[in-house]
Amino acid sequence: MKRDAKEEGAVVGAGSQTLMRGLDVIEAIGEESLALAELAERIGLSKSTTYRLANALADRGYLAHTPRAGYRLGSKLLQLGFLAQAQADLIQVAREHLEALAAATDDTVHMGVLEGVQALYLDKVPGRRRVNISSRVGDRHPLSSTGLGKALMLDHPRDFWIDRFREEQKTGSHPIAEDLWLSRMESYVLRGLAFDLEENEDQIRCVAAPIRDAGSRLVGAISVSSAAQYMDDERMAALSQEVAEAARAISRDLGWVERGK
């Protein structure tokens, strides 16, 4: 018997509601393991409805249940998580955000990752200004003198900073006092972003921020670079919010969840 459009819409609507409730169950369990009564209270449904939803999800492997611990995330979600991570290519995920940031600032935007003890530049979106930024995709740059490199080191211990600073100062062309550099790095950690104050290239400044994955691991960084004449202290401070928000947007697309949100 064929359903009419009204009946079909009702079925689809009911199915969508059930799907959304199932997702509510998964998200609640994602925060912590819960017993049936706790789960029902958390998502605002009756125990019987919650039981049916949770058991259906458990049958498909999305949840698992033990009598004492209650419901927890199942092996199917672990499998899907690995697949999602494999599909989330950093360059592909970030490109739209990099282009938007370059368009909004008129400046050159870079993205890079830590490779060994250097910053590897994976992508570059040129700005509209007639500013020559001597960088190319595939280039490797020092960590201690570039904004991107400093952002990539924000989660590293102080000993790592000192080791890279001292080693790179041997061959660098822009010397800086170690105490001053360390003081700046400590401030960058607190702010969650980093600056390049003409330390890597004459008359070039940049603002950089880290990218994080679903496990909150620092997996990359982005930067906005321009000539010093366009990057006085006031503009760098103003750009900080834009660059940090772009990095957070990329991170969210990689599965990162900001704590406290």
Image (tube, rainbow, N blue to C red):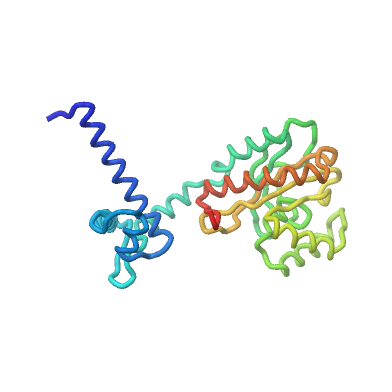
23 vs 260, left or right, is: left
Q: Quadrant of residue 102?
A: top right
159 vs 169, left or right, is: left
228 vs 111, left or right, is: right
Question: Which residue is painted at 75% across and 59% down in the image?
Answer: 187
Residue at the left extreme, as displayed: 1
Question: Which residue is painted at 73% across and 70% down in the image?
Answer: 159
Residue at the top extreme, as displayed: 5
Residue 105, percent from left and from top: 71, 36
Residue at the bottom extreme, as displayed: 68
Residue 44, percent from left and from top: 34, 54
Q: Which residue is at the front of the view, 161 or 63? A: 63
Q: Which residue is at the front of the view, 42 or 241? A: 42
Tally the marks. Answer: 0
Residue 101 against residue 172 in the figure, above or below: above
Residue 15 against residue 80 in the figure, above or below: above
Q: Which residue is at the front of the view, 4 or 205? A: 4
Q: Quadrant of residue 73?
A: bottom left
Residue 164, percent from left and from top: 75, 63
